[in-house]
């Protein structure tokens, strides 16, 4: 069993970007989606979810760009990540080395497609998923 106090201490030292990456990594690893609210919120939302399921699905308008693999040109990938995200060198390097990681979240389809194209041009393996 993990030492909870130690985990709390380590998590509290994370930057916002690192915390976001941790959330995404845990969601992917556990196959769940982080949600806000308690059990009552989930129970109250169940009828709404059933009604939404009956409606035709809308095409997503926001996407997440996920770096799955860096590829052979790590430095070039870092440069592209910096240009896309305005991160500093260390943050961009950490993001790239932490692959799989989210490069951009909740961006429009054009921005996500452009980012995917630029990263794939330098050899990265990218996944584009609907946000939400």
Image (cartoon, rainbow, N blue to C red):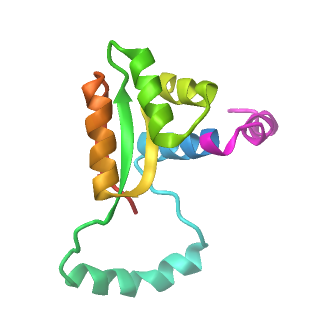
Estimate the x, y position of residue 81 in percent, counting from the top left.
Answer: 45, 33
Vertical position of residue 50 compared to residue 60: above or below: below
Vertical position of residue 4 compared to residue 131: above or below: above
Q: Residue at x 36, y 14 (%)?
A: 73
Q: Residue at x 28, y 55 (%)?
A: 110
Estimate the x, y position of residue 29 in percent, counting from the top left.
Answer: 44, 39
Q: Main secondary structure of the magenta part?
A: helix
Would you identify the image quadrant in which residue 131 lies? bottom left
Estimate the x, y position of residue 12 in percent, counting from the top left.
Answer: 77, 42
Which residue is situated farthest in the front direction here? 83
Which residue is situated farthest in the left direction here? 56
Magenta segment: does it hold 14? Answer: yes
Query: Which region shows up in magenta?
Result: 1-17
Quarter containing the C terminus: bottom left
Q: Residue at x 25, y 27 (%)?
A: 121
Q: Residue at x 29, y 45 (%)?
A: 114
- Exactly how many numbered labels are in the figure? 0
Quarter containing the N terminus: top right
Would you identify the image quadrant in which residue 116 lies? top left
Magenta segment: does it hold 13? Answer: yes
Estimate the x, y position of residue 20 in percent, counting from the top left.
Answer: 57, 46
Which residue is situated farthest in the top direction here? 72
Would you identify the image quadrant in which residue 45 lies? bottom left
In this image, 122 relative to 14: left or right?
left
């Amino acid at each position: 069993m993990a030492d909870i106090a130690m985990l709390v201490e380590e998590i509290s030292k994370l930057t916002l970007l690192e915390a976001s990456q941790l959330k995404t990594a845990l969601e992917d690893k556990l196959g769940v989606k982080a949600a806000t609210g308690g059990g009552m919120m989930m129970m109250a939302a169940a009828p709404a979810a059933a009604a939404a399921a009956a409606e035709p699905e809308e095409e997503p308008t926001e996407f997440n760009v996920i770096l799955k693999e860096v590829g052979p040109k790590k430095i070039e990938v870092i440069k592209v990540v910096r240009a896309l995200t305005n991160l500093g060198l260390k943050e961009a390097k950490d993001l790239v080395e932490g692959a799989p990681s989210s490069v951009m979240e909740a961006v429009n389809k054009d921005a996500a497609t452009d980012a995917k194209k630029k990263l794939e041009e330098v050899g990265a393996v990218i996944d584009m998923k609907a946000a939400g």
